[in-house]
Structure formats: C-alpha cells, structure tokens
Amino acid sequence: MASLRQALRAAAFRPLPWRLQLRPLSTPKSPTTEKRVPYQQTLKEGKDSVGSGPTRPLPNSADVVVIGGGSLGCQTLYHLAKLGLTNIVLLERDKLTSGTTWHTSGGNVVSCETSRALPHIRQKQEEYGSPLGKAYAIESHVLTPAETKALYPLMNVEDLYGTLYVPHDGTMDPAGTCTALTRAATARGAQVIENCPVTGIQVRTDDFGVRRVAAVDTDYGSIQTPCVVNCAGVWASSLGKMAGVKVPLVALYHAYVVTERIEGIQNMPNVRDHDASVYLRLQGDALSFGGYESNPIFWEEVSAKFAFGLFDLNWDVFTQHVEGAIKRVPVLEKTGIKSTVCGPESFTADHKPLMGEAPELRGFFLGCGFNSAGMMLGGGCGQELAHWIIHGRPEKDMYGYDIRRFHHSLTDNRLWIRERSHESYAKNYSVVFPHDEPLAGRNMRRDPLHEELLQQGCVFQERHGWERPGWFSPQGPAPILPYDYYGAYEHQPHEDYKYNRLLSNEYTFDFPPHHDIIQKECLSCRDAVAVFDMSYFGKFYLVGPEAKKAADWLFSADVHKHPGSTVYTCMLNHRGGTESDLTVSRLAVDPEASPLTPSFEGDGYYLTVGGAVAQYNWSHITTVLQDKKFNCQLVDCSEDIGMISVQGPESRAVLQEVLETDLSNEAFPFSTNKLVKAAGHLVRAIRLTFVGEMGWELHVPKASCVPVYKAVMKAGAKHGIINAGYRAIDSLSSEKGYRHWHADLRSDDTPLEAGLAFTCKLKSAIPFLGREALEKQRASGLLRRLVCFTVDKKVPMFGLEAIWRNEKVVGHIRKADFGFTINKTIAYGYIQNPEGGPVSLEFVKSGDYALERMGVIYAAQVHVKSPFDPDNKRVKGIY
C-alpha cells in the first residue's frame, strides 16, 4: 500500500482536473457504491435490496412522520417516542444510515461544543474553551507544548503555543447508535419503514388561508398526518420542494482517509488543528484524517437513488490535508493508506443546522443541514426538535438553528446560498475572531443610505443579508467586491482588497488597530451628537379589527396607550422566555394612506425590531396570530421605510432646524411619536434612544431618506455631528445596560431574570403570552439573574468568559464590550447560586467577583444598576 508521502508526490505530478471541471462548480465522477470504509457494519448488511417494497405496511395515519433514517431522523424519532408519542413513523427511502450517516468517520463528539445547555455554541478558539468548560462543568485543560508531547508522543509540538485537552471527547459508532435508537423507539410503539421513498407532500389550506401539512405520499400509499419532519440530509431540498418549502443548503463532497496500523497511536486523543484545517481521529490502531479545503467539490445533481455510495477521492483537492496531517503527526509520512472515503455532506449558509417549523408551511419541520456534524449534534438537536414538535418550542434557545432566521429573499437566492455555504465550509476550522465578517453573499440587501455612507468611509457589517454600518474609516470608501471563492475554481483572488484588509486588521483577540476610531464615534455621541443609520431594522404594521386583542396577547407591556405613544416591550413564549424586545407605537387613524400611515379599521400599531432578527420576529408574530385566529393583519414595511437615529446632547438643537415641530420636553416627551415634516418630507419622529442619550429616531419613506439625511448632516455641522456605526452602538448601549436580543436576552431567558420586569404588565389583569410562567417564577424566586460587571484593567472581552463568585464558577459572560465613557470593560452574564438556591439582589451584591479570560482571572465589580447615568437624566434631556 502506498504511503501518504508517495500519494502526495503522485498528486503533485498530475494535472488538476478539478480546475477544469469546476469552472461552473460542477460535479466529478459517479459514485463508487461498494467501497470499504470504517464502520462497514451498517444496517444494510443482511437486508433486502431496494425495490423489494416497504419493510412493513404503511399505517393510514400518524401523528408525526419523520423522513430520513440517518442520525437526526433516528434521534428525533427516539425522543418523540420518549416524550410519549406512539403513533409515529420514520420513512427511509433505502436502509437506515444509507445516506451520509453510514460513512461518517466515527461521529467525533466534542464536549465544549455540544453542551445541551448551549447547543448553538460552536466556539473555535481554544483560549475560550477552557473558561467555557468550567462554566458547564466540562473537564478541560490548557496544556503546554511539553505537556502535549507527554500526552501525545507522536505529535509535532515545535510550532505550538499550547493545546486544549478535553478528556471526555470521543467518537461514536454511527450504525450502532442508530440501531439502538430505533430499537428503543419501536419498543415504545414507533414504526420504522425502510425501502419506502417519499414521492410527495399533500398540503391543505385552512379556513384562514394558512397552508398546513395534510399527508405524505409514497408509491405504496399515503399516510395522513399533520406533521412531517424533514431529516433527509443532502436530499432535504428536494423533499422541501415537494411541499413548497425552501431548504437553503448545498451538497458538497467531504473526504477522509484511513491509515494502516500506527505503532504507539493506541488510546491517543482525537486532534483538531485549526491552522491546518485538519482533524485526526483515532481509528483503533490507526488514524482517519481529513479537513475542510477552500476548493470543495459541489455535488451538482443530487441523485435520488444514491445509497451506501461513495465518490472517488480527488487527491488534488485532498492533498492539503495530507500535508497538514504529516506536519502535525510526522509518522504519517511513512504510513500506508488503508482506505479512502469521499461522500456527500450538506452545508448551510452560516454553518449552522436548519431546524424548526418552516414559515411557509405549518406542520413541516426541518432537522437537516448539519455541516458534517450530524452525529455530534444529533442527540441534543433531536431532543430539542422533539420537544419543539410536541410543546410548540424547544426547551433551550435554538435561534441560531431556527430556519426562521433567514429572510425569504435569501432562501430564494441560489447564488447567495452557494457562495455562503462554500465560505462556511472553507472557513469551518478558521479561528472565529470577534468582529469577522463574511466575504460571500454580500450586498444582497442595501438600505437607501448605503451609497451615501459608503463614500464617507463606512465599513459595513452583514446581518442576514442586510449591509449595516459597522464603523467609519478615515481612509475613504471600502467597497465590498463580488465573492472570489478565495481563489478556488479558477477565480482570480482580489488584489489589494481594501475591505478585506480592514477586516484582517481585526483578526485579533486584543483591541483592534482602529480602537480609537470607535472611541471617537462613541465620545462624539456622548459629548455632542452622532447620526446612526438604522434603516435595516424590521418595521411592521399590526392593524385590523382585532389588533388590540392581538397586541394585548403578544406584548408583555401594555401598548394600548393613546395614539402617539411608543412603548418598549418584550414578546414571550409560553414558558416565559423572551422571543423579542421591540418598540410598539400606537397609530391614529388617518384617512390619507401613506407608507407612514396605513389605512386600517379598528386599531393600528407600528412595530420596530432589530434587523438581524426581523424575519424571526415576523414568523413568531405570524404563528401566534394564526394559532389564536385573530382577525388582523401583519404588514412588512421594512423595505419601504428607512430609519435615521440622531443621538446626543446636541440632538435637539440639530433636529430643531430640520423638524417642523417643537422638540421641548413638554411638547415632545420621551417615548412618544409624531408625524412631522423634515426638510419638506413627511417622517415619523419617535423620541427614543438605544445609546442612553437624548435623541430621536426619524422613520423616513425610502425615497426621502437621502435628502432628510443630508439636511440633518448640514444642520449638525456646526454642532460637531459625525456618522457612527453599530460598533459604537454596541459599546454605548452596553454602558447604559440596554439588552441585545440573542446576546444577553434570549428565548430561554425571562424578563424577570434579565432585569426587564418593568416591561411586563403583571400588575394589570390583562392576559398575555407567557404570563402564567412569569407569575410562577416570581412566586418561586429567580434561580439565575443577569448582572453587569466592570473590570478596571483595560482588557478586551467578547463573551464566554467564566464568572467567578467567591472562588466558584457561577456562570459565563454573554456579552462584553469596552465602555469608552467610563473607560472600563463592561460585561453581562447570568449567574446561579452554586448551592442551588434563589439568586436574590442581596446574593448578587454580597459576592466577590472575577472574570476569567484566556486563563487569566481579572477582578470585577458587580452592578445592579447601569454603570452609566443610572438615573436616566440624559435620556430625559437633563445634562
């Protein structure tokens, strides 16, 4: 058998066929269907061949039909059965594990990434692995090179600073796992039917115009069901098309090789080398290794008949992994190759799975797109998905995996899916720096001020398709260029790419080189005035005869105030968790309809939500309206209205020259809104802030955004007005203690835990979604609480740092930033009582705290109020 070095040399002298084949990113050869791989003991052995018909008769109906017999399908079936459902069916077109599960290289399980408490965390940098492990009682150790060598004698450690060692990481047998799961599920009454391809999904439209799952069709009959779970892996998109559901994933070739026996490798840990983008997994007395290259091969035409198949390994693509593996474990250079494995895997645009109920079709759930990590994530995700199906939502926060995170304009765009999925694959093992941004799939959604701000040096951030201002560079425009696939597939890499260079400057866990620029934006807002383009925010109208009923139920605060009022509120789920925080403005009926004043009967409300989660909010509200059958409409006007926020002590003086209305505290109090003229254009001015200063938001029709913005900048010139971006917003709002949804506020955090009890109308008798859960929690006491910390030492923190209280770990940081006004690091995290009791304010204030960053512990002060302007004087205009 050839050694790896020989294979490397052979590849060097061969032409590069992938460069010819993949100009349009096309597929290579047909799969090899009978290649030996590790875990050959799959469920195909001893079974009848495909085409002999289903292994058992189809039932007429089922409560849930799971489609796909891989890791996720088997896990979901098992957890549904464990939760008490018996009338459930798993349909597999061939045999269990025949798709991608059977050829996985041992189901690598990484403890620090798969904690059930934080299933969304995929933190790559080793420096944060140890503190996070401490927060979740996962044994982990940061080792020196010498300690690493003692643990793994065959490893080259000459170029290492250190390693993260997690003793309880390991592997699992894919086929054995799926067998055990399906046996346990069928013992509880579930049915598993193989050799039964699905040919269609029947859909019905109910009396309210809502599309719902009705049945699953096969060549052997139909199963009536209200619920289908798409666990079809790389075939999930095809299954989605049968139901009119978009499943944004692509199929890529992923390969690994298995070596001959290696003396001394037995009982060694698995290894991941992020710099080389390679993994090495123990395979008995051998190693299997592979990685994630920049030129993966797309499987263009996904075959519906592919089962227990493999592709021929393309050595020209795989060579870089050989080099990386030999560098890390030099003995591999003279080791033979026992087998090669190249099979299809599904990858998604943000390298996170696709889970939850599809927004296009009620009762159609997704459990797919696991980016070659289905075995590792299957247990926790299958459990949460089962809970989701039965109880209406998962137990833990799953926003990062929820299919509703994607706007329809993105799931409709195959180029965006392709580019972003390629980049997520190529950067799978890249170190995740705090302020990195994608280069793929950019400029998909641009607001009316985009070109204006670009010319002023705006460095944009991407949030679910939107380009939003991050910060402003004095070096001038830094346009985002078309995706170059990192030079793969004969694409010419961009030379002197300014935007990419600015991003690269931030590839650090220290303060970035332009830290002083962010400081200037923040202090200008605090000392004078700054303008923020927040046009990417979601903007919805909730109108109709039963809009008040809907608002009472949806929103935790009482938003039915007088027309012209604006209320900060939360939306909750039935467990009391926070699905969103937003502002709701009560509308007056206006006979003249316009983008700012829709026509409606009954009541009307204007909703403003964070742009990164706007689609998620839209789907949550829509689902509640459908379930409660409220007679009202939700209208998305996000693309039609821009949003310019003017904040700071001089904001009133600036805007008084632009707005045709009195801006005094008496005439225009905080948390109110008016329709006014701005430089001759009608706008909705709302006196609000997200940075802790006096200020107004101007909600402007799209066509009027540029002239209104220019009028604001002209009026503000003598007051020192500057542009500022979201990097400044993050710092300023952290100083003020404002919450960021899905940072320090998530769907498994209640408003009581997050310090937002004031947003809840618990003193009223008005029912609202989540009220019962909050009342129960309030009566029993809080078992955790969000607290603010400051660190006097000027040290960067970004989240995931361990929180120490009286020399015990009591939680981890959710969100951190540097506060330029107070000149300290600010961090927020939830703490628990290690003894298991309630976390009272006295408990919080009585502790001695420290935060651990990259193995170094820093003394911290705890705050029960905002460390900046705790009395809210500046918000009220008192300076």
Image (spheres, rainbow, N blue to C red):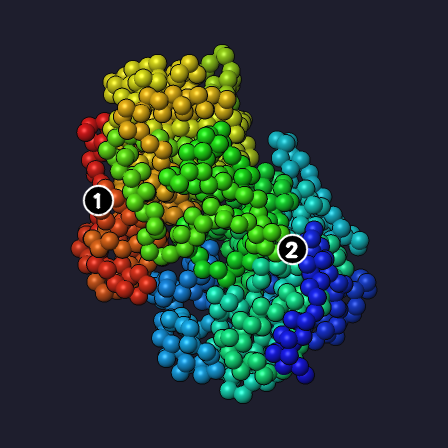
Can you tell which quarter of the image residue 295 is in? bottom right
Closer to us: 444 or 245: 444
**Residue 280, image x, y percentages:** 53, 73
Above or below, 589 relative to 851 = above
Are the residues flagged by discs 2 and 1 in contact, CB closer than 8 Å? no
- Which numbered marker is on residue 822? 1
> What is the three-letter code of the residue carrying label 2?
Tyr
Closer to us: 281 or 629: 281
Residue found at the very far bottom of the displayed protein: 263
What's the residue at 48%, 32% (across, down)? 451
Q: Quadrant of the N terminus?
A: bottom right
Q: Is residue 435 left or right of residue 33?
A: left
Residue found at the very far front of the displayed protein: 496
Q: Disc 2 designates what residue?
A: 489
Would residue 180 be seen by someone viewing this image from the given angle?
A: no
Q: Is residue 844 left or right of residue 581?
A: left
Can you tell which quarter of the image residue 878 is in? top left
Whole-number angstrom distance, CA of label 2 to CA of label 1: 50 Å
Closer to us: 117 or 434: 434
What's the residue at 49%, 73% (across, down)? 271
> How many other residues sit within 10 Å of disc 2, few (<14), some (14-19) or many (≥20)?
many
What's the residue at 56%, 58% (across, down)? 426
**Residue 710, image x, y percentages:** 40, 23
Above or below, 683 relative to 805 = above
> What is the three-letter code of the residue carrying label 1?
Ile
Above or below, 115 relative to 173 = above
**Residue 652, image x, y percentages:** 28, 23
